[in-house]
Amino acid sequence: MFLPGRPLARRALRLLRNLGARSFADFASEATFDIKEACGVGIENAIKPTDHLITAYRVHGIAYMRGIPVKSILSELTGRQGGCAKGKGGSMHMYGQNFYGGNGIVGAQVPLGAGVAFAQKYQGFDSLCVAMYGDGAANQGQIFEAFNMSYLWSLPCLFVCENNQYGMGTAVERASANIDYYQRGDYIPGIKVDGMDVLCVREATKFAADYIRSGKGPMLMELETYRYHGHSMSDPGISYRTREEIKEVRSKSDPISLLRDRLVGSGLSSVEELKEIDVEVRREIEEASQFATSDPEPPLSDLTTHIYQTGLNSRIRGITPWQQLAAA
């Protein structure tokens, strides 16, 4: 499950370009999973399928880790019927079983995650919620409000800060008085983890999940990671850092390279086996890409579906009060 994330993110970018997308929002998810593979993969392999996860808008790789097929992810990105949100969510808003998708408002997913965790406790379930956010969102007031309520109510929530060192184009040292994000939960215990090492992330998440399931309340986990690219297509990514810095991270800390070297060095796999997996992954993504550009777009009648959990069996207001549409 480790390999598809990076080629998936790159194919998503290519599809958007081919569709003629030009705005910031269209490319805000460009660096979705590129270099952050260890974060998503490590977390998913340490929690249960019955656990819940919510994140921001860099969502493609996380959606795959939550069990959404590549075909459904790319079809959603192109707004097709076969998408995981029936073509209604687009690049940022993908949803699946126990996965509450990407959220476009910076930091807004964190209190929502606390709410999901509250629902688990209220209903007596032995499941937790992982609420992920970036260092750029870490100064949002709503995050501290969520921390406070989660501690007061001992909610089963794992708050995960993916610290990639730069919130948009601003280095963390210039944006935050305290850059030790794992310490910013006040009374909530926190841990700092190498977010470039998938095994470190997995074991740290297991530890945090065990702590939370024991009824001790929430925990905060900071994953130190990076991004190779700019924040979006409007950001070249080198106006606030050097090419040499990026090159050094690529050569020394790339999560896929680190895992590949570890697998080959320990004799658990061979270079040839990994190449075969890589070929198979690229074939799957190519097939999914072709489906995502040929699958039909949703019909106009779908405009009024999935608004409510159950259909109203009536008609609702359209663009104007006198234009009524059937609610399903």
Image: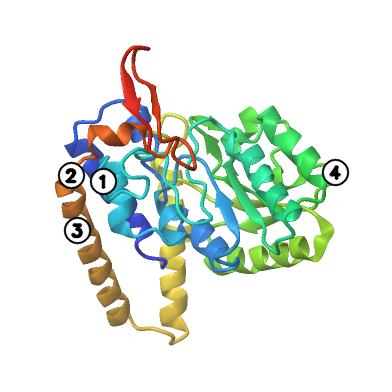
- In the displayed structure, does residue 300 sit left or right of residue 131? left
| Residue 156 seen anywhere in this rendered image of the structure | no
Q: Position of residue 318 (x, y in %)?
A: 35, 20
- Three-letter amino acid code of the residue under disc 3: Glu
- Three-letter amino acid code of the residue under disc 2: Pro
The answer to which of marks 1 and 2 sits earlier in the sequence is 1
Q: Tag 2's secondary structure?
A: loop
- The residue under the point 24% across, 71% down is 280
Q: Are marks 2 and 4 in contact (CB under 8 Å)?
A: no
Report which residue position mark 2 lands on. 296
Report which residue position mark 1 lands on. 81
Nearest-to-viewer mark from 3 and 4: 4
- In the displayed structure, does residue 88 sit left or right of residue 309? left
The answer to which of marks 3 and 4 sits earlier in the sequence is 4
The answer to which of marks 1 and 4 sits earlier in the sequence is 1
Residue 195 lies in quadrant: bottom right
Q: Position of residue 58 (x, y in %)?
A: 44, 43
Q: Are marks 1 and 2 in contact (CB under 8 Å)?
A: yes
Q: Tag 1's secondary structure?
A: loop
Q: CA distance from mark 2 to mark 4?
A: 48 Å
Q: Residue furthest front?
A: 313
Report which residue position mark 4 lands on. 152
Report which residue position mark 3 lands on. 286
- Three-letter amino acid code of the residue under disc 4: Leu
